[in-house]
Image (cartoon, rainbow, N blue to C red):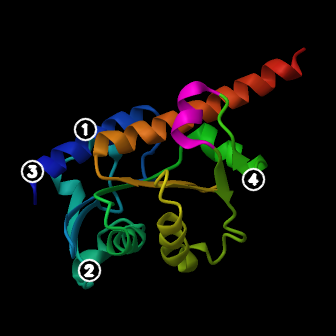
Amino acid sequence: MQKYLLNDLKNISLSMFRKDFIGIFHGALSAKVENNRFIINKKDAIFDDISEKDFIELYSKKDYRWNEASIDAQIHLNIYKNISEAKYICYAMPPFTTSYSLVHNEIIPKDYFGSITFGNIEVYDTKQFEDWYERAEIEIYRYLKKETSTGIIVLKGYGIYAYDRNIHKLAKKIALLENSCKLLYYASEFNRGR
């Protein structure tokens, strides 16, 4: 596997774990190696102590290795196949963004950095969760393909998928969105206390 890609994924993984964007067993990070190959974490990866053995290289043609990969592997593959700008992908569940999505249909950042980076973000309603994984691999890449300005989808009560050409910009994008949602929450609490 590509050493530099693995090092990038390991470093960002620890940072995102410490921020509570990804957890012990929830979250997924991947990097495209070539058009038909990508590296993704295994399904039992623990993100705060991730090592090379916690990643697996997959080809677009499914083989036995897919059994070890994250359950999000098919979603990542569809994004890579359909969005050429995607070099890195992350599924994360940042707590403020995810909880904000439960009670709002869009996120309108009021802070400077969130506002200039995102503008307004629609919250995508997954409808029922029972068949979500059957629909997710198609619905997510279709939404992201049409929403090219941010490279991010916020899924109601589920988390976010984001892609970028640069892994550090990807992590920054997720952190900015989480910070905007945190500030929106604190602002609403301050207004309630008046």
123 relative position to 48: left or right: right
Q: Which residue is mark 4?
A: 105
| Amino acid type of the residue tagged 2 in the rendering | Ser
Q: Earlier in the sequence, mark 2 or mark 1?
A: 1
Q: Which residue is mark 3?
A: 3
**Structural distance between the alpha carbons of marks 1 and 4:** 33 Å
| Secondary structure state at the residue bearing disc 3 | helix
Q: Which residue is mark 2?
A: 60
Q: Which residues are magenta?
A: 111-119
| Secondary structure state at the residue bearing disc 4 | loop
**Structural distance between the alpha carbons of marks 4 and 2:** 34 Å
Q: Earlier in the sequence, mark 1 or mark 4?
A: 1
Q: Quadrant of residue 184?
A: top right
Q: In the image, residue 15 lies at what x, y percent?
A: 35, 34
The reply to whether discs 3 and 2 touch (Cβ–Cβ < 8 Å) is no
Q: Residue at x 59, y 40 (%)?
A: 95
Q: In the image, residue 107 lies at what x, y percent?
A: 68, 44
Disc 1 residue crowd, few under 14, some 14–19, many 20+, Cα 10 Å: some
Q: Which residue is mark 1?
A: 11
Q: Earlier in the sequence, mark 3 or mark 2?
A: 3
**Structural distance between the alpha carbons of marks 2 and 1:** 26 Å
| Secondary structure state at the residue bearing disc 2 | loop
**Structural distance between the alpha carbons of marks 3 and 4:** 41 Å
Magenta-colored stretch includes residue 112:
yes
Q: Residue at x 75, y 53 (%)?
A: 105
The reply to whether discs 1 and 3 touch (Cβ–Cβ < 8 Å) is no
Q: For the view shown, which residue lies furthest in the right direction?
A: 194
| Amino acid type of the residue tagged 4 in the rendering | Asn
The reply to whether discs 1 and 4 touch (Cβ–Cβ < 8 Å) is no
The reply to whether discs 4 and 2 touch (Cβ–Cβ < 8 Å) is no
Q: In the image, residue 1 lies at what x, y percent?
A: 10, 60
